[in-house]
Amino acid sequence: MNRIEASYLIETPFEVEQACQVMAGEQSCGTFTRLAAETDDFRKRHAARVESIELLDSVDAPSLPMPTRPQPPGTRYQRARVRLSWPLENLGPSLSTLMATLAGNLYELKEFSGLRLLDVSLPHAFAEACPGPQFGIDGTRRLSGVDQGPLIGTIIKPSVGLSPDATAEVVKELLDGGIDFIKDDELQANGPHCPFTERVDAIMPLVLEHEQLTGRKVMVAFNITGEIDEMRRHHDHVLAAGGSCVMVALNAVGLAGVSHLRRHCELPIHGHRAGWGMFSREPLLGMDFAAWQTFWRLAGVDHLHVNGLANKFSESDDSVAASARACLTPLFEPPGPAHTVMPVFSSNQTACQAIDTCRAMGGRSDMIVTAGGGIMAHPGGIAAGVRSLRQAYDAAARGISLADHARDHGELAQALETFCP
Ligand SMILES: O=C(O)[C@H](O)COP(=O)(O)O
Ligand SMILES: [Mg+2]
């Protein structure tokens, strides 16, 4: 396949075919008027094509405001699923230009009262040009020493406000509880009250000491989100301190920032998706996770946040489950690389969601589950919080109900009472 393909959900009060031709033109060699240089032959080589249109339902009000093209009362707004394609020759295998093409100015076109990017299929040239994940699932399991089951993890909470030493005290309790994975919150990178290098230097000796005792290095995703030179410096600091993961807030750092980091990086990259709601919350705007994650996997993340079941945000469980499965779906047909990454369940996670989360994963256990409040606010303390989560996921793996398992697992019993009354 030498064309880039993308599906969209669109809504328009105009003739659908014509509106889609405007979209294809604007995002390739056309503009609002035909140009002399735009010969038929030129178009044949460079124009985006409308490959298919599947009409869906119509509605009586626009999903998005149309201030520059208000429609008379009684207008119907037709929805459709459309597939467009572009010649690779237009942009080459450039991730940034791909974003500007597939998710660029088309959102603002007057023809549409709704437009959402659903999925993307790319020519093999992208697999060759983009770095892709360096560690992925296998590398994460190898470095963390967790060869099966989910990685039981947490986010340091409170997200901000703890000094490096206070953070290290929390880490000590997490290690005592048997945690597999710890991450900074996305709000804590290099705050003056908790400077990055001091935080790493306070935490890593504890992690290494714990490794001496247990033979397992707990993976700590230090948040290196920042300027390019700062990210490189902080990555190097984590590496030199014996750390095994770095984290970035993807939307804050951008595609070019992540690809650059990936090319420099010697550690797994934990991708936090803070800001995702901007892309996803309005059903007729933005993009589906299936499309969004394609970009970041190609840029080279190894872990990707997918929200969590029964989360504190506005996303349905079905959508979260679909996102997790998307991370585990190969990006290219063989012999191309699969580029699968670890889905990270996070947001309001406690012992309560364990069985449903395992079910949503359809029997696969390649996931990181991070519970911040769900561990830190456990009535028995932080170590007990870790144990409660582990007990819940053990029960889920063994097909035992949480209530049954809680009979002889006190920490789980306390968690169920506290978080899922
Ligand atoms: O960064 C995250 O993933 C969230 O802050 C999750 O925090 P919570 O587990 O306390 O909801
Ligand atoms: Mg957070």
Image: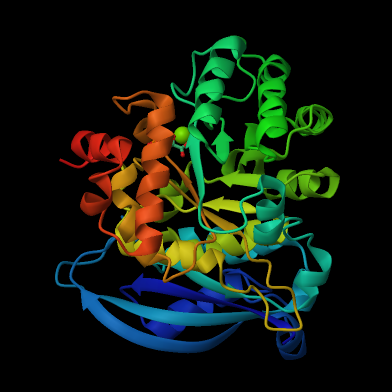
Counting from the top left corner in percent of width and height, residue 147 is at: 62, 57
Query: On the rendered structure, is 91 left or right of 206?
Result: right
Q: Is residue 143 left or right of residue 386?
A: right
Q: Position of residue 191 (x, y in %)?
A: 60, 16
- Look at the picture and state if 410 lies above or below 289: above
Q: Residue at x 66, y 29 (%)?
A: 210
In the picture, measured across the screen, residue 412 lies left or right of residue 132, that is left
Q: Quadrant of residue 10?
A: bottom left
Q: Residue at x 38, y 46 (%)?
A: 391
| Depicted 155 relative to depicted 351: above or below | above
Q: For this rendering, which residue is in front, 121 or 22?
A: 121
In the displayed structure, would residue 412 be above or below residue 119?
A: above
For the C terminus, the image quarter is top left
Position of the N terminus by quadrant: bottom right
Residue 392 image point, x, y percent: 35, 49
Q: Could one spot residue 224 in this view of the protein?
A: no
Q: From where the camera sits, is residue 14 visible?
A: yes
| 365 left or right, relative to 90 | left
> Looking at the picture, how far across and down is residue 16, in whole percent?
39, 82
* Residue at 35% in and 35% down: 374
Which residue extends farthest front? 408
- The quadrant in which residue 3 appears is bottom right
For the point 74% across and 73% down, which residue is it? 337
- Nearer-the-camera pick, 297 or 344: 344
Q: Nearer the viewer, residue 190 or 394?
A: 394
